[in-house]
Image (cartoon, rainbow, N blue to C red):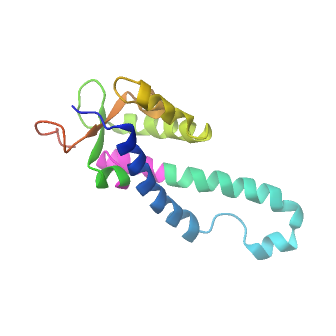
């Protein structure tokens, strides 16, 4: 298996952030502007709620895509796949759930969980270590990968 590089993962995350932005912009999260203007004392709590939801919804959607596809749209575009670190088999639903929880932790620490990638021999970020997964470069990996059943 050839592990995805930090720069490949960063490009995939950039692509994912585009569709995350679309979700956040077009799905109403929290109260409307009219509601905030009629109750200005709720502005701070509304902003906190919106920020939490704007982070959590895209990450949870990504977790579902990991469980179904074994990859996110950004990783798919970059020809990367998330697999079990020990076997190279597609990740399980349990690993996808653990990876999602780890992803929430990674983003809760302002992305600090990604700082492990350049220094880890298997190029794992925090969420990969939590779920015991690795991100591989499908185009560079010799042989066929096992398919999801």
Q: How many marks?
A: 0
Is 2 left, or right, of 30 in this rendering?
Answer: left
Where residue 122 appears, as percent x and y from the top left, is 34, 26
Residue lying furthest bottom: 34
Residue at position x 35%, y 31% in the image: 133
Q: Does residue 57 lie above or below 7 as drawn? A: below
Residue 66 picture location, percent across and down: 36, 46
The answer to whether any part of residue 149 appears in the image is: no
Residue 62 belongs to magenta span = yes
Q: Looking at the figure, which quarter contains the N terminus?
A: top left
Q: Quadrant where the C terminus lies? A: top left
Above or below 134: residue 14? below
Is 45 magenta? The answer is: no
Q: Is residue 146 left or right of residue 18?
A: left
Q: Nearer the viewer, residue 96 or 114?
A: 114
Q: Which residues are magenta?
A: 60-73
**Up/down of 56 relative to 38, above or below:** above
Characterize the magenta stretch by its predominant secondary structure: helix
Residue 36 visible to the viewer: yes
Comparing 137 with 22, the one in front is 137
Q: Is residue 113 left or right of residue 82?
A: right
């Amino acid at each position: 298996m050839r592990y995805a590089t930090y720069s490949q993962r960063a490009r995939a995350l950039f692509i994912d952030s585009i569709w995350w932005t679309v979700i956040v912009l077009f799905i109403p999260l929290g109260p409307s502007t009219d509601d905030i203007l009629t109750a200005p004392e709720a502005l701070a709590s509304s902003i906190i709620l919106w920020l939490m939801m704007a982070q959590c919804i895209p990450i949870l959607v990504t977790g579902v895509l990991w469980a179904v596809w074994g990859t996110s749209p950004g990783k798919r575009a970059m020809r990367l796949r998330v697999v079990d670190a020990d076997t190279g088999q597609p990740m399980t639903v349990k690993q996808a759930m653990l990876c999602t929880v780890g992803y929430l932790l990674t983003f809760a620490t302002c992305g600090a969980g990604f700082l492990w990638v350049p220094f880890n021999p298997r190029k794992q970020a925090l969420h990969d270590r939590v779920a015991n997964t690795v991100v591989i470069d499908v185009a560079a990996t010799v042989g066929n990968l096992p398919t999801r059943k």
